[in-house]
Image (cartoon, rainbow, N blue to C red):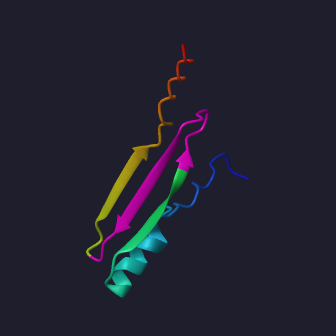
Amino acid sequence: MGRHRRPPAPELPADTDARLRAIAEQRCVVEEGVATFPESTVPYAYRTVHRPDGTVDRHLVRLDPPPPHPHPRPPR
């Protein structure tokens, strides 16, 4: 057995299926969802649009919680 190892096989990008489907069907393919990054508790909404021409639009929006409501003052 030699000292050199075979390099790992190249992997396709994760969105290859959606890209190819958009091109083959000649229509936009949209992926939407909510994700949290590792070691974070802040959720993000994402939207990815795969277009028939092979281009991709990606949008990422942080979902901040609403500000706390001030406590009503007690009547005097």
Q: Is residue 56 above or below residue 28?
A: above
Over which residues does the magenta segment extend?
35-52
Please give the name of the residue rendered at 36% of the width and 53% of the height, measured from the top-left corner. 59
Asked whether 42 falls inside the magenta stretch, the response is yes
Q: Outermost residue, left direction? A: 53
Left or right, 49 with reference to 35 = left
Q: Is residue 9 above or below residue 21?
A: above
Q: Position of residue 45 (x, y in %)?
A: 47, 51
Hey, which quadrant is residue 40 in on the image? top right
Please give the name of the residue rendered at 55% of the width and 40% of the height, measured from the top-left corner. 37
Q: How many marks?
A: 0
Q: Is residue 46 above or below residue 36?
A: below
Q: Position of residue 63 (x, y in %)?
A: 47, 42
Please give the name of the residue rendered at 45% of the width and 69% of the height, measured from the top-left corner. 16
Q: Outermost residue, bottom direction? A: 25
The one nearer the camera, 66 or 53, is 66
The one nearer the camera, 46 or 54, is 46
The one nearer the camera, 23 or 42, is 42
Asked whether 55 falls inside the magenta stretch, the response is no
Q: Outermost residue, front direction? A: 76
Left or right, 23 with reference to 1 = left
Q: Outermost residue, right direction? A: 1
Q: Position of residue 39 (x, y in %)?
A: 61, 33
- Where, quadrant-wise, is the C terminus in this rendering? top right
Q: Position of residue 68 (x, y in %)?
A: 51, 28
Q: Is residue 11 above or below residue 39?
A: below
Left or right, 63 with reference to 58 = right
Please give the name of the residue rendered at 33% of the width and 81% of the height, measured from the top-left corner. 27
